[in-house]
C-alpha cells in the first residue's frame, strides 16, 4: 500500500508544479491577447484581471495523466480501463469551449450545448453510469439510455455548479480542491480497503484534480493576479464529475457487502458506505446549493436561469459584512465540513462522536457566519489593545467649539468619496504594465465602501 501512496504523491506534485509554472506565462499571454473583460456590475474585483487560467490547469491535467501512465502501480489504470482517455477527450473539448468563452464571450446556450457534447464524448468511450445502489433493494442496473442521460445530467450539473461558485478570488479552486481531497480518501479506501480495482480511475482523477487546484491557487488567492475563467471552472467541474461517475457507475456495491445474508440485508447494513455512491454531489454540496438557489431565484424573477446576478452565496457573505478573505474561508469551512463529514460518517457510522463533532462544527460555522451582525465594541480604555474593527469609531462634532469626540450613529451611511477625474485607460501590453492592478484606469472604479457592491 505504501508504493501506490508514493506514486499518487508524485503525480500530485508533478501536476502542482506544471500548473504553477505554466500560470505565469499564461497570464502574460492573456494580457497580450486582451482576455481581460471589463468590470461587470456583479464583479467584486476593481481592476480588469486576465483570464484563461484554465490553460495552465489543462496543462497540469495532461502532465498528471502522462506521469501516471509511466508509473508501475498506476499504469494498470490505463491498461484495464478506457476512462482516462475518455476524461482527456471530454476535458479537451470543454477546455476549448471555455477558452473561446474567456476571449469572445460566447452565448450561454452554446456553452450548455458544448457541455452536453463533452459529456457525450465521455459516454461514448465508456465513462458512464451502469448501475446505481438503492438502499433496501440492492444494485439497480440501468438501460443504456438511462445511464447515458443520467451521466450527461450529472456532468452538466457539476460543471455549472462549479462555474456558478467561481465569484471570489480562490473560491472555486479551493472548494474543488477540498472536495477532491475528500473524494480521494473515499475512493482510495474503496480501492485498497475493499480490493476493488474499479475505483482506481476515480482515485487517480481526484489526485490530479487536487494538483490542478493547488498549483493554481497561489496565483488566484486574493488579490488574484489571474482568473481561471470558464476554461478553468468548467474543466475542474468536469474532472470532478468524471470521478463521481466512475466510482458510482463502475463500482459494483455488492462487492462491498459484509457477508451478512442476502443482498437486501447487505445493502441496508452498508447504507453509510453507499452515501457517497448515492449522492456523489455531497462533496460539492455548497456549489450545488448555490446553483439550485440561483435557478429558483432567477426563474421566480422572470429571468433566464443563465442570467448573471449578485445573489450568490458569496455575494450574500459580502453583504453581511464579511471581508473578501473571510468570506472565502467561510465557504472553505462549510465545504470541508460537508465533504469530510460525509466521508467520515461512511467509514464509522456507528460512532456518535462523529455526529456530535459535525453538529459542534456546524454550530461554530454558524457563529462565524453571523459574526459581523454581532461585532462587539471594546470600551474606551481598551481601544489601543484591540484590532481596529473592534474600536469605537469617533468623529469631531461640528457644532461644538471644543471639538469633542462623538460616536456616530450605527445606521449612518459613510460619506461617499469625492469623484476623481477620469483618466485615459492604459492599453494592455504597453510598456510599464506590471500586474493586474496596472491594467485599466483606476479612476473609473471608485472606492466602494459598502462590502459586496462591486461583484
Image (spheres, rainbow, N blue to C red):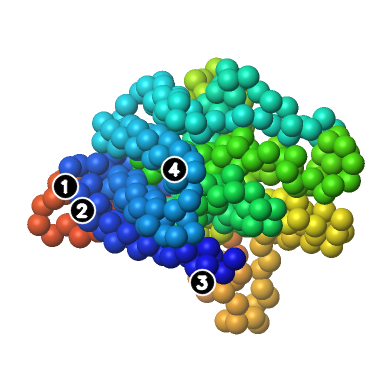
- Pointer 1 residue: 32
Determine the image quadrant of residue 350. Answer: bottom right
**Residue depicted at x 32% and y 59%:** 18
Q: Secondary structure at mark 4?
A: helix
Asked whether disc 1 touches disc 2, contact meaning CB atoms under 8 Å apart, the reply is yes
Q: Secondary structure at mark 1?
A: helix
The image shows residue 79, relative to residue 249, as above or below, that is: below
- Pointer 2 residue: 28
Q: CA distance from mark 2 to mark 4?
A: 31 Å
Viewer-closest of 312 and 97: 97
Q: Secondary structure at mark 2?
A: helix
- Pointer 3 residue: 403
Q: CA distance from mark 3 to mark 2?
A: 53 Å
**Residue depicted at x 89% and y 46%:** 260
Mark 3 or mark 1, earlier in chain:
1
The image shows residue 110, relative to residue 26, as above or below, that is: above
Determine the image quadrant of residue 70. Answer: bottom left
Task: Tell me: 116 left or right of 372.
Answer: left
Q: Is residue 136 visible?
A: yes
Q: CA distance from mark 1 to mark 2?
A: 6 Å
Amino acid at each position: 500500500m505504501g508504493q501506490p501512496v508514493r506514486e499518487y504523491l508524485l503525480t500530485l506534485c508533478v501536476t502542482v508544479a506544471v500548473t504553477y509554472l505554466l500560470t505565469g506565462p499564461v497570464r502574460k499571454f492573456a494580457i497580450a491577447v486582451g482576455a481581460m473583460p471589463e468590470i461587470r456590475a456583479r464583479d467584486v474585483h476593481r481592476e480588469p484581471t486576465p483570464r484563461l487560467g484554465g490553460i495552465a490547469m489543462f496543462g497540469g491535467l495532461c502532465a498528471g495523466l502522462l506521469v501516471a501512465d509511466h508509473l508501475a502501480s498506476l499504469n494498470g489504470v490505463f491498461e484495464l480501463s478506457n476512462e482516462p482517455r475518455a476524461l482527456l477527450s471530454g476535458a479537451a473539448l470543454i477546455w476549448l469551449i471555455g477558452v473561446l468563452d474567456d476571449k469572445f464571450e460566447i452565448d450561454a446556450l452554446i456553452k450548455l450545448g458544448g457541455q452536453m457534447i463533452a459529456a457525450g464524448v465521455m459516454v461514448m468511450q465508456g465513462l458512464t453510469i451502469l448501475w446505481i445502489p438503492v438502499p433496501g433493494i440492492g444494485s439497480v442496473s440501468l438501460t443504456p439510455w438511462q445511464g447515458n442521460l443520467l451521466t450527461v445530467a450529472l456532468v452538466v450539473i457539476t460543471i455549472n455548479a462549479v462555474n456558478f461558485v467561481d465569484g471570489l478570488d480562490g473560491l472555486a479552486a479551493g472548494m474543488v480542491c477540498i472536495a477532491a481531497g475528500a473524494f480521494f480518501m473515499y475512493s482510495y479506501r474503496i480501492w485498497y480497503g475493499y480490493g476493488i480495482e474499479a475505483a482506481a480511475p476515480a482515485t487517480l482523477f481526484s489526485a490530479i484534480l487536487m494538483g490542478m487546484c493547488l498549483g493554481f491557487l497561489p496565483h488566484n488567492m486574493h488579490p488574484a493576479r489571474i482568473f481561471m475563467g470558464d476554461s478553468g471552472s468548467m474543466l475542474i467541474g468536469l474532472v470532478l464529475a468524471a470521478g463521481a461517475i466512475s466510482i458510482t457507475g463502475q463500482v459494483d456495491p455488492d462487492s462491498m457487502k459484509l457477508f451478512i445474508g442476502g443482498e437486501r440485508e447487505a445493502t441496508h447494513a452498508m447504507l453509510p458506505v453507499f452515501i457517497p455512491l448515492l449522492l456523489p454531489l455531497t462533496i460539492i454540496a455548497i456549489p450545488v446549493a448555490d446553483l439550485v438557489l440561483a435557478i429558483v431565484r432567477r426563474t421566480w424573477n422572470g429571468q433566464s436561469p443563465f442570467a448573471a446576478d449578485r445573489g450568490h452565496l458569496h455575494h450574500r457573505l459580502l453583504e453581511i459584512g464579511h471581508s473578501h478573505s473571510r468570506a472565502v474561508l467561510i465557504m472553505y469551512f462549510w465545504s470541508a465540513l460537508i465533504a469530510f463529514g460525509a466521508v467520515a460518517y461512511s467509514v464509522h457510522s456507528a460512532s456518535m462522536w462523529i455526529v456530535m463533532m459535525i453538529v459542534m462544527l456546524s454550530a461554530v460555522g454558524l457563529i462565524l457566519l453571523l459574526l459581523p451582525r454581532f461585532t462587539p465594541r471594546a470600551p474606551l480604555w481598551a481601544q489601543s489593545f484591540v484590532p481596529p474593527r473592534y474600536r469605537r469609531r469617533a468623529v469631531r462634532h461640528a457644532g461644538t467649539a471644543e471639538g469633542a469626540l462623538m460616536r456616530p450613529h450605527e445606521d449612518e451611511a459613510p460619506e461617499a468619496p469625492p469623484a476623481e477625474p477620469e483618466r485615459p485607460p492604459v492599453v494592455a501590453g504597453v510598456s510599464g504594465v506590471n500586474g493586474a492592478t496596472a491594467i485599466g484606469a483606476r479612476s473609473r472604479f471608485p472606492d466602494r465602501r459598502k462590502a459586496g457592491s462591486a461583484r
